[in-house]
Amino acid sequence: MRLTKRSNIAMRVLMYCGVNRHSLVTKSEIAESCNTSENHLAQVINRLAQLGFLHTQRGRNGGMRLARDMEEISVGEVLRATEATVPITECFDASENTCPLVRGCRLRDVIARATEAFYASMDDVTLADLVCENNQLDAILSAPVTCPQRAIHA
């Protein structure tokens, strides 16, 4: 099974917001730290906000933060939401299916069970499991502290 780029970016965004949970973070900070384009991020952030994973705030002092506690966000829930429109294989998409075996194929049922087992396994993992007490991730994703520019008078 291969996850889409959208799911990968969604998890990066949520982990970044988790590491920096005490402040609003910006799209540009995430793009730089997570090595992804702001265009891809904008789409993913919008979707995560629609799904209730992120709270976004517009404006000059805007940004985003988690909309729920990390313990309440399961990786399985995020992946299901971001992968929902992508069929695991051709036969799961009625409008695109060209396989002549679909009516008698047992592999389809096996793939469906395996996919559900994957998601069930991911349901047991929360964002907190990925972020909390993870010093390496903290070092990679901690937002830089920016100080307002002050004029220095001599």
Image (tube, rainbow, N blue to C red):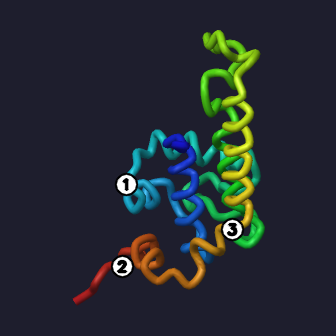
Q: Secondary structure at mark 3?
A: loop
Residue 35 shows up from this direction = yes
Q: Callout 3 environment at 10 Å: few (<14), some (14 to 19), or many (20+)? A: some
| Label of residue 150 in the image | 2
Amino acid type of disc 3? Thr
Where residue 130 sits in the image (x, y, percent)? Answer: 58, 71
Label count reads 3
User: In the figure, is residue 130 to the left or right of 109?
Assistant: left
Amino acid type of disc 1? Asn
Q: Nearer the viewer, residue 59 or 4?
A: 4
> Label 3 belongs to which residue?
126
Q: Nearer the viewer, mark 3 or mark 1?
A: 3
Q: Secondary structure at mark 2?
A: loop
Quadrant (top left, top right, bottom left, bottom right) of the N terminus? top right
Q: Nearer the viewer, mark 2 or mark 1?
A: 1
**Is the residue under label 1 in contact with that under label 3 (CB below 8 Å)?**
no
Q: Residue at x 40, y 72 (%)?
A: 140
Q: Nearer the viewer, residue 16 or 26?
A: 16
Q: Callout 2 environment at 10 Å: few (<14), some (14 to 19), or many (20+)? A: few
Where residue 33 sits in the image (x, y, percent)? Answer: 40, 62
Q: Residue at x 52, y 58 (%)?
A: 12
